[in-house]
Image (cartoon, rainbow, N blue to C red):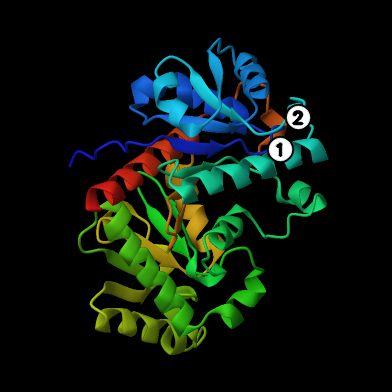
Amino acid sequence: MTVRIPLLPLAISLGDPAGVGPELIAAAWAQREAEGLPPFFAVGNRDLIEAAARSRGLAIPVVAIAAPDEAAAVFPHALPVLDVGTAPWAPGQPDDAGAALALRALEVATSLVKQGAAAALVTGPIAKSRLARIGFNQPGQTEFVAEACGITPENAVMMLAGPNLRVVPVTVHVALRDVPFLLSTELIRSRSAIAAAALTRDFGVANPRLAVAALNPHAGEDGRMGHEDAEVIAPAVAALKAAGIDARGPLPADTMFHAEARATYDAAICMYHDQALIPIKVLDFDEGVNVTLGLPIIRTSPDHGTAFGIAGTGTARPGATVAAIRMAGECAARRATAG
C-alpha cells in the first residue's frame, strides 16, 4: 500500500549538540531524495548544524526559518532549521550549555507537534546525565513527551521497530533482579493492548499478531524454573485473547527470534530490556527506530545514543535517523488518512 506523505513537515529535535545528532540530521537531509523522506525541519541552531555537516564533508545549504510553515518551501533546496538557542559545536565534549540547547529543542519541537504545527516528532539522542545536571527530572525523552501530552508513564509504551522485527519491552530501564516483582498481569495486558492498537492505527496492520515472551527459560518448565509464566504472563495472554487480540504465549524466548518464528507475529512482547533489545540490535542495528506508542502524537527516535566518542569524525551511520524520519512520516500519513 502506498502511504500518503503528510501535508505538514516533521519536527526533529537536535539532541545533545556534542553528540552525533546534528550531523546525522544533516546527513539525512542530504539523502532525502534517495531515501524518499518527507519534508522535515530541525529544531536547534542553524550555525551548529552547518558546522556539524561540514565535519562530514557535506557542503549543504542550511537555512534558518522563523516558523514551521516555512519549512516545506525551503526543504527541497536547503535544510530548514528553527533556531531556539545557541551553544558551541564541540563534538565529543558535552557541557551544560549544550544540554540546555538540547532540552530547549525538545521542548519546542514537542510543543509544535502538540499544537498541530508539525506532523510528527523525531527526537535526537540526548545524554540523560547531562540533562539531569540542568534540572531535567524525567528518566528520558519518552517520559517527557508523555507528560507533555498528558499521558501517564505506564500508558506510554516503547516499541523498537526495524525491517525485520518489532519488540515491546514491558519493563525497560530497571535492574534485572527487579523485573519479576515489577511484572503484573495487568501491566502485560495493558501494554500489549496499546501495542496492538498502535500496530493497526499507525502501522496499517489490520489484525495484529502478538507473540508474548516467557520470563523464565523454557517458559518456566511447569514451575521448575519459576512460576511467573503460568501465574502472571499466561493470564495476561488469556485476557488479550478474550478482548479479541491475536496473542500467543508465554513462549520460550530462545526460539522466538529466528526467521521462521518471526514470520508468525507482528510484534514480540518481551518482559525486560535485553530480552527485547538484543534481538533487534542483532537484526536491525543500523535501522532500528524507537517509537512511543499510546500518545496522541507520533514520536520516533533513532535507536542509538549520543555516541560522543565518534561525534565529528564522520563515521556515524545515518541509517537509524533516516529510518526514524521515514517511519514518523508513514505513521503520521496513516493517521491523517484515517482522519
In the figure, residue 199 lies in which quadrant? bottom left
Task: Verify CB contact (< 8 Å) between mark 2 and mark 1.
Answer: yes
Circle 2: element type? loop
Q: Where residue 240 appears, x then y in whole percent?
A: 31, 79
Name the residue rendered at 53%, 65% in the picture: 150
Residue 3 vertical position relative to residue 267 in the rendered view, above or below? above
Q: Count the labels in the image.
A: 2
Name the residue rendered at 54%, 67% in the picture: 272
In the figure, residue 214 lies in which quadrant? bottom left
Query: How far is disc 2 from disc 1 in space, using C-alphas?
Result: 7 Å
**Horizontal arrangement in the rendering, residue 245 relative to residue 80 (left or right):** left
Amino acid type at circle 2 is Ala
Given residues 279 and 140, the one toward you in this image is 140
Q: Where residue 45 appears, x then y in whole percent?
A: 65, 27
Amino acid type at circle 1 is Leu
- Judging by the rendered image, the residue that carries numbered circle 2 is 87
Q: Which mark is residue 101?
A: 1
